[in-house]
Amino acid sequence: MTDQTRYLVVGSSHAAIEAIAAIRMHDPEGSLTLVTRDSHLPYSPTVLPYVVSGRSAPERVFLRSEEFFTAQHVAYRPGNALAKLDTQGNKAQLADGSEVHYEKLLLATGASPAIPPIPGIDTVPYHVLRTLDDALKLKAAIAGSRQAVVLGGGLVGMHAAENLVAAGAQVTVVEMQDQVLGGYFDACAADFIARAFVAHGANIVTGRRVVGLAPSAAGATIRLEGGDSIEADLLLVATGVKPELAYLAGSGVAVAQGICVDNAMRTNVANVWAAGDCAQAKDFYQDAITLNAILPDATEQGRIAGMAMAGDPGRRDYAGGVPLNTYHFFGQHAISVGSGVVPPGGVEQLRVDEANGRYLRAIFQDGRLLGIFGIGTFFDGGIMWQLILRRVDLSASMDRLVADPLATGREFMSRLWR
Amino acid sequence: MSAVLEKPKQKYIVCEGNEAAALAVALARPDMVSVYPITPQSSLVEHVAKLIADGRMDAEIVDAEGEHSVLSVLHGAALAGGRTYTATCGPGLAFMFEPYFRTSGMRLPIVMSIVTRDGITPQSVWGGHQDAMTVREVGWVQIYCESVQEVLDTTIMAFKIAEHHDVMLPVNICLDGNYLSYGASRITLPEQDEVDAFMGVKDVNWHAALDPLRPMAVDPLTGGATGKGPATFVRYRKGQCRGMQNALRVIAEVHDEFAQRFGRHYAPLLEEYAMEDAEFALMTLGSMSGAAKDAVDEARAAGRKVGIIKLKTFSPFPVAALVSALANVKALGVVDRSVGFRWNCGPMYQETLGALYRLGRHVPSASFIGGLAGADITVEHFHRVIEQTEALLHGPAPTEPIWINEHD
Amino acid sequence: MGRAQNTLAFDAAKCDGCNKCLQACAQAKTGTDDIARARLQVLPAAGSFELALCLQVLPAAGSFELALCRQCGDPKCVSVCPAGALGKDADSGVIAWDGSKCVDCLLCTVGCAYAGIALDGATGHVAKCDLCDGTPACTAACPTGALSYVTTARIYNEVGDWEDLFAPGLAGCQGCNTELLMRHTLRRVGPDTVLATPPGCVPGMGSVGYNGLAGTKVPVFHPLLTNTAAMLTGIKRQYKRKGREITALAIAGDGGASDVGFQSLSGAAERGEQILFMVVDNEGYMNTGMQRSSCTPYGAWTSTTPVGRESKGKTQDAKNMPLLMVNHRCAYVATASTAYMEDLYAKLDKAIEASQTGFAYLHVYSPCTTGWRFPTEKNMEVARKAVETNFVMLWEYTPAQGLQLTRPLDDPQPVTEYLKVMGRFRHLTQEQVQHIQAKVEENRAFVEQMAQQR
């Protein structure tokens, strides 16, 4: 049997639910179906470390209820993945064998853990953290762990490491780059953060690869480049994520690292859009499309895709992905907005207050803000994001912005877009 | 002439024309009357007010602050489905001209007596047809009465004519100020149930209504030179003209029906008096006709072949009936109670010239103007009119109007 | 779809940076005097910051701005929250923070471009304005009226639920507030209405329609410019006679009411006809090309009171129509302005009620973007300035209660604040301005004296 729907949305996280809101804003009546492989109500992958830590009760992390879908006239079909796409026939085949005939399709299927090709990895038990079920399993495992190894010093890995520390385990984070949190902070800031971990008893290993994994009595033996080995009763693989796009085989939808989309989140195939972590979209800083798998971008892309699908004339082009993140570790806050790369001719301003644990770094080019990064120094990330996107001329105010980013940012907000 | 079906119950009273009009209005059971006093109409609306105050007439009365509002109130009431009535004259009619013009365009079957009065200035407060004649081209049906009884009967008929679906136009019943308004005579008063049966079902806003149960825009903007405007405007205006022409037939039908039910027959459009073998004729309008008839009777007795064509319906102008009445006339004297400034003659004379063209042969004629501002046109005056008209059979026609009361 | 909600409004022109709002907020929300922790922040604005730094003085009034949660309709803080800790309440419109769900990730502060949600360093959590459950501490503490709590949402939501009885797409001039007035009034009065719109801007916008197409869903017509109240008299009385309740409503211009239509209006008012007569006063015959009416104020340019060598604008004062109507002892008389919708609505309700027993007269001042010569987006500002300078006074009258000011001013602005925002007064001489100011004072004294007679 084949279902008919005007809008088919695949996926159920931020990009998908933002797209649904955008579609419904313009078209309150058109039939809308949401299919997702997850059997839970919508939730954010970003909240999962807090489920692991116990900060978030797993039954209270859902972003939408069943009633939401009823009220929005959305046929909600969880636990059913997209298996194959027939873009010629505008048909989606689902894992349970059923078909959905769509007029407009949004692929918001997110990403899955990228498992590195380490010899022996398929011989040892390990955890990943991408789904609510992953989080619940990891939470249970942490309780009994004495000696844990986290592969990958990104946000997921560092969050988990902190949770393990809190649970009383001996933790080692292994990161093959020279610093942790490479995508968001520079070496100086990363060192700042890494030192906090070390101070709390964690072991941070950077600049070294894992060359082999083998089963052991405890669980797994992790062999590092250069000969050392670490025993682990709990191994977490947190070496990044990548879109899982097997369902696109033969569909004609162009894929690079993710699904290639234009500034309206349209793929190369008629009637098919993509948004969120599975989409490879315009980068703000360069004339290229990149994967920018972060939450604020997913909502932005989902909104644009939804508006485009519904024909909302208010739609604006995607401004381009800007790296954005916030990070909370051992009671301290870190915020990262924009690119950390200092381009030729760029200006870097750095303010470090070791005694008070404060760090601020800002990068400008031609008086325009490219990125700003703070630890223990609060500023309004949303305002900084706008200063970057609007390419506001801050030539006369760069010093002031670094000296007092909160007040200076708000002043520009008031002046320019309040 | 129709046969009388049965002899209805009769009730006789003696009253003036204004009271007769008021009694007729009561019998016609309007929903609303709106009033403002003016000489010589005042006693008419006083009678109406008293009838309502005494509970002898069930109608809403609005004592408006002027004639302009009087007619406007009735516009609203008619669009809300009410049967409506008022009366005015002279300066009052002039003041209500703005809504007056609009009444026929909205096809509102309002009945209004004009207790005719001469136009000011020269200042005067007395009768004359100048007021009604001045607005003869505004799309109202205008019917003139000769006697008090005719005032009563025609006022009842006026509602039925106005509300006829083929007409849907406002009707003026013109009764001569002073001579009919204050002239008392014995009249027969019809019974209410007879009038009710005669009037039939009231249905006055089937075509255009201001009713929340039937919402519509009444009189949206039209005309102009683009889009549907020109054709829409023509459709409305042409409909008014067709309604006027339909009125000629309906007036006759209603008079016929009235005669059958009440036993009193009036020539609906024009009356031919002593016209069977008339060589020459007079034309009269309104109350002057009584004196004219007396004079003609005497002239006939003296062997003069003179007759009278008395117009009752002045608007629409009964061209065909007049052409027929003039078929054998060789000279014509038209007596007006008002003036036509542009043609230097009486208005009825001017209109008659048009009918004479339709006749297709030349008829020597003269315009007589008399009875202005309350002046009387006596039998003696009419003898002179007869003489001067008869002279047209042999001599030249005057190029100027003959002013009847000029040397009184 | 979208609902209106009550909100905080900030008028920079009135803010002198006293920080009392911040103190009140800090006390209400943190129990401390630490204004840095207040959930709104007053900032020097628009270039004044650098200037103030250079001169070492405080910025002057009118140069402050606000960082405050706007309780957005489509809040990005909510959409970027991974924990479901932020949500917009459908009724109050408040974006509420649920501390039991929050994971302190600060992503909301990245989502918000207005600094409406920020880290409270003392708690380690984000904090934001919650409008104090409808009784904001900050507005209560504001001594200048710069911060106010606008509670008109109820009106818009209620009215939004009623049927719009006008056709879509009325053809008004850009920026005209009359369409707002027409739509709101008719929604409020409802379908059991007969609507009279005499010649002027209202039918000019298409209220009656063109060539057989109607402009409203209620029975509607053009009366003559002269006979609106008389026609409505006939309509209302006829329905009363038939035992049917309808509202006889006029939406008329000032010319049709104060000049050629005054006789029928006065007559109907004297007779106590059960009519709701609304005058949309744009102080002239704007629909026919901006000619003078008796409601045109002294000194104003119109196309028949032009500015030339011998004379400059109208040489007489305006006729005060609403006071004339008070002297008819109508069942209800009020003045209103679209800049004060809450006040207007309260009066509309009273006028509707009064029109079921007698004559109700509502005089609404309606700035004309085209004829008064001001930018199309300034309509509400012009309307507001008229009231703030006492050029227009808002009051209501009933025979039982007498005349009462509904928006008395303690400290009216000079009338020049009103005159200067539009082109029709641009030519005024100093003497003419003085004349207008004196007239405003005289009128104020007269109205206040009437108000005190109870």
Image (tube, coloured by chain):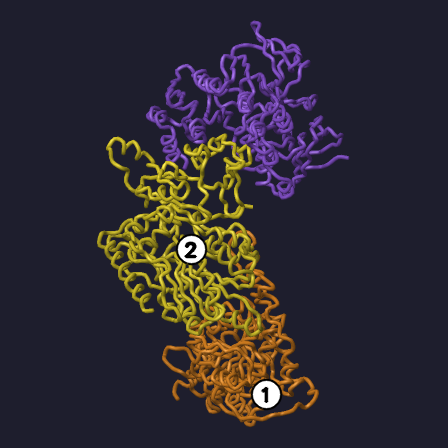
Chain colours: A purple, B orange, C yellow
Q: Could one spot residue C350 in this view of the protein?
A: yes
- Dot 2: few (<14), some (14–19), or many (≥20) neighbours within 10 Å? many
Q: Chain of mark 1?
A: B
Coordinates of residue A349 in the picture (x, y in percent): 37, 19
Task: State whether residue A391 is above or below residue C10.
Answer: above
* Vertical arrangement, residue A4 with respect to residue A184, above or below: below
Q: Chain of mark 2?
A: C
Would residue B355 be seen by someone viewing this image from the given angle?
A: no
Identify the residue under disc 2.
C287
Q: What type is the residue that disc 1 sits on?
A: Ala
Where is residue C300? Give x, y as percent. Answer: 31, 54
- Nearer the camera: disc 2 or disc 1: 2
Considering every residue shown, the one lying at the far left of the view is: C431
Q: Determine if marks 2 and 1 fall on one subunit.
A: no
Q: Residue at x 64, y 18 (%)?
A: A126
Classify C149 as above or below C85.
below
In-front residue for pair A356/C258: A356
Give neighbour class at mark 1: few <14, some 14-19, many 20+ (Cα, 10 Å).
some
In the image, residue B396 above or below residue A169? below
Q: What residue would you read off at disc 1?
A: B274
Q: Secondary structure at mark 1?
A: loop
User: Are circles 2 and 1 on residues that touch, CB within 8 Å?
Assistant: no
State the image quarter where residue B357 is shown. bottom right
Q: Residue at x 38, y 43 (%)?
A: C27
Of all residues, the one furthest to the right in this rendering is: A1
Drawn side of residue C100 relative to residue C263, left or right: right
Q: Quadrant of the C terminus of chain C?
A: bottom left
Compared across the picture, whether C324 is left or right of B87 comes to left
Q: Secondary structure at mark 2?
A: loop
